[in-house]
Amino acid sequence: MTQVAVGDERLNSLVEFAGRLADEARQVTNKYFRTSVAAETKPDASPVSIADRETETMIRCMIEEAYPDHGIFGEEEAPVRIDARHVWVVDPIDGTKSFLIGKPLFGTLIGLLRDGKPVAGIIDHPALDERWTGARGRATTFNGAPVLSRSCVDISQAWLTATSPAMFKDTQIDAFNRLAGACRYVRWGADCMGYGLLASGFLDVVCEATMDPHDYLAVVAVVEGAGGMVTDWTGGPLGLEGDGTVLACGDPALHKVVLKILNG
């Protein structure tokens, strides 16, 4: 395992703990995957199942036992201690719709904030046995091997992905269409895997909107540790507060170009 920067040994232990959280989460999600799991509809019209709830409860219990002074911000339960120095940000099943139809691109997202800033994150795909791990001061890994995002300074050669066109509201869809028109190819439906594939150098831009913190904070360290850049659509840093927009680019130079296109 690539070590974090000297002097930050505690972060290294927290990253290892995040890996154990992801290991245990796999046991729950894979138990329910491609079974006759019933879905309920939440107030925001998104689906939720026993797999989502059981996975988050298990993760929260592990965090409470190991780090009772840490905060937790998850999708399915109320946040606790989010003013703490360390806050875990959890999406037990990112891509619940994919999960429910048997599509294996769903993932578990586990992020860690320190003083409000993302310092570690895991993108785990239980059904595929694939995991990206990132942390400040170390190279992002895919299943334990270091990965790098790729260089792409020419927007006309860029591959772009987003989860769904339905995530863009009002003028956001116009901005996205400008970007899509400037890129070489556009692909839909990657869920959180898009950020991992960007970190591994297989695509160049992930551009999304109407996202919640549990959807994106885990991906920040993964993208940045691979050499990429991730912000909101104004170029600002991502945190628990934000407008729900996310822009990730494998090449920081391309990121500047994309920001100009999105902002007209």
Image (cartoon, rainbow, N blue to C red):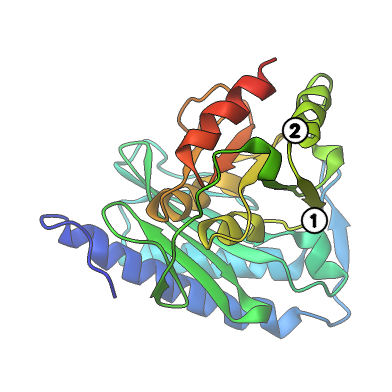
Locate residue 14, reporting x and y percent: 30, 63
Q: How many numbered badges does the structure rendering display?
A: 2
Which SS class for mark 2? helix
Residue 32: mark in rendering = none
Of the 4 image quadrants, the one containing the C terminus is: top right
Q: Which of 56 and 103 is in front in this view?
A: 103
In terms of depth relative to the viewer, which is nearer, 23 or 177?
Answer: 177
Q: Where is residue 207 in the image (x, y as percent from the top left)?
A: 67, 39
Dividing the picture into quadrants, the one containing residue 12 is bottom left
Q: Is residue 155 left or right of residue 42?
A: left
Give the left or right position of residue 194, taking residue 115 as reference. right
Q: Which residue is depicted at the point 70% across and 34% down? A: 209
Q: Which residue is drawn at the image coordinates 49% and 43% (left, top)?
A: 251
Do residues under tags 1 and 2 come within 8 Å of each other at their CB atoms? Answer: no
Mark 1 vs mark 2: in front: 2
Question: Around disc 2, counting alpha carbons within 10 Å, would you say few (fewer than 14), some (14 to 19), or many (20 or more)?
Answer: some
**Which residue carries the number 2 mark?**
182
The three-letter amino acid code for the residue at tag 1 is: Gly
- What is the crowding at mark 1: few (fewer than 14 residues within 10 Å), some, or many (at least 20)? some
